[in-house]
Amino acid sequence: MTKESAKEELGLRWRRWAHRVRLAVRRSAVDYFRGDASDLAGLAAVAVTIPALALASVTMPVWCPPGALVLPILAGGLLLRPASLLFLYAASALALVVESAVLGPYREGPARVTPGTVLLVTAVALAGLVIAQFRARVGVPWRRGHTMLFDLRERIRVQSRLPHLPAGWHAEMALRPAGGQSFSGDFVVATRTSGGRVLEAVLTDVSGKGMDAASRSLLLSGAFGGLLGSLPPHAFLGAANGYLLRQNWDEGFATSVHLVLDLESGDYELLSAGHLPGVQLHAGTGRWEEKSAEGPLLGVYDGAEFQGVKGTLASGDVLMLFTDGLVETAEREIAEGMDRLIGEADRLVGTGFRGAAWRLIEAVAKDVNDDRALLVVCRD
C-alpha cells in the first residue's frame, strides 16, 4: 500500500468515526428532548449546585442563606424523575445538617439554619415530588409537555382554517376562547367538495368552555374534519351524532350548524343540531333575516333527524353563523344579543365585511367569560 493510499484510508476511517459520533450525539439529544433518555446528566448538573450553595451559605450566610437550597430542589422537581429526586433530597438534607453544624445554633444569631428554613425546604421538596410524580403518571416529560400543548393549539388553528374561495366570495371566521385562553370549546371545520364547487363548513359548540371543553373539542374537530366531505351533506350530522353517542361522555352533548353552499349559484342549505339560527343580510332590501333549521342536540339520542332550511346568497348578501357566547350572557337574552350583533353588523355594510368577524366580537362580546365563534360568508 502506497503512502497516499494509506492517508486516504486513514481519512476515510476518520470520517466514518466522526459520522458515527455525530449520529450518536444527535440521537441522544433527540431522546433527551423527548424525555426518553436517562436523566443522569440533569441530576448531576443540579446536584453539583448543592455543595456549592452549602459552601456559600457557610462562608457568606448573609448573601446566600441556607434557604437557597430550595433552588436546586425546585429545578429538580421540574427536570428529574421521582427516583432521581430522592437522591437530590438526600443530598439537600445532608447539606442542611452540615450548614447547621458549622453555623451553630440558630439562637446565636441571624443567617442560621432555623426551623423555618427546614420547613421551607421540606415544603418545596414535597411540591416538587408531587409535580414529578404527576408528570411521570401522565407520561409527558417537561421537555416535551409544553411543545405538545403548542402543537395541539396549532393543529386546532390549522383545522379551523377556511379553504380558499373563488373570486366573488369572501369567508372568514374568528374564535375567542373564554378567559383569554388558547383552547376553546368552539371550533370550525370546512372544506370544498364536488370538485370545489361546494363549500361545506361546520360550526360546533361543545358543552363546557375553555380548557374544560378543550380535549373534547380537539377530539371532535378531528373526527368532524374526517367526516366532512366524506359523506353526503344530509348524512353528516347523523354520523356526528352517532360518533358523539359512542363516546359515552358524562357531559357529551354539542350544538352544531352545517352550511352547504353552492359557490356557482349562491344557493345554500343550513342543517342545525340544536344550534342558534344564522342571520342573512339581503343587500337589495337591507333587511336581516333569521335562518333557523330544526334538529336536536348532538349526543342526546340515537336516530335523530335534522331538517335543513334553504336560501340564496345574491350579490352583496352576507350570512353570519355564531355560537351562543357571542349573543347570550347572564344579563342579556339571546334575542337582545342577536339584535345587538345585527346592529353592529349594519354599521359595516358601507365599508364591507372584510375583517368583520374579529371586529364584531370586539364590539359585541369583548369581555364575555365564554367561548365565542363567528363565521361570516359574503358574496361580493
Image (spheres, grey):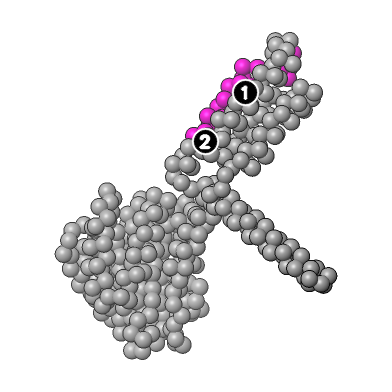
Q: Residue placed at 26% from the left, 71% from the top?
A: 236
Q: Which residue bears the numbered disc 2? A: 82
Q: Give coordinates of residue 233: x percent, y percent.
A: 27, 76
Tag of residue 340: none
Relative depth, front residue between 299 and 123: 123
Does the stretch in magenta take in 125?
Answer: yes
Residue 94 lies left or right of residue 159; in this view the side is right
Does the stretch in magenta take in 110?
Answer: yes
Q: Give coordinates of residue 310: x percent, y percent.
A: 25, 79
Tag of residue 93: 1
**Which quarter of the rendering shows the C terminus?**
bottom left
In the rendered image of this protein, does residue 169 appear above or below residue 333?
below
Residues in magenta, as a range = 109-131
In the rendered image of this protein, does residue 257 appear above or below residue 117?
below
Q: How far apart are marks 2 and 1 (CA)?
A: 16 Å
Element at label 2: helix
Relative depth, front residue between 130 and 195: 130
Residue 285 lies left or right of residue 354; in this view the side is left
Relative depth, front residue between 165 and 27: 27
**Which quarter of the rendering shows the N terminus?**
bottom right
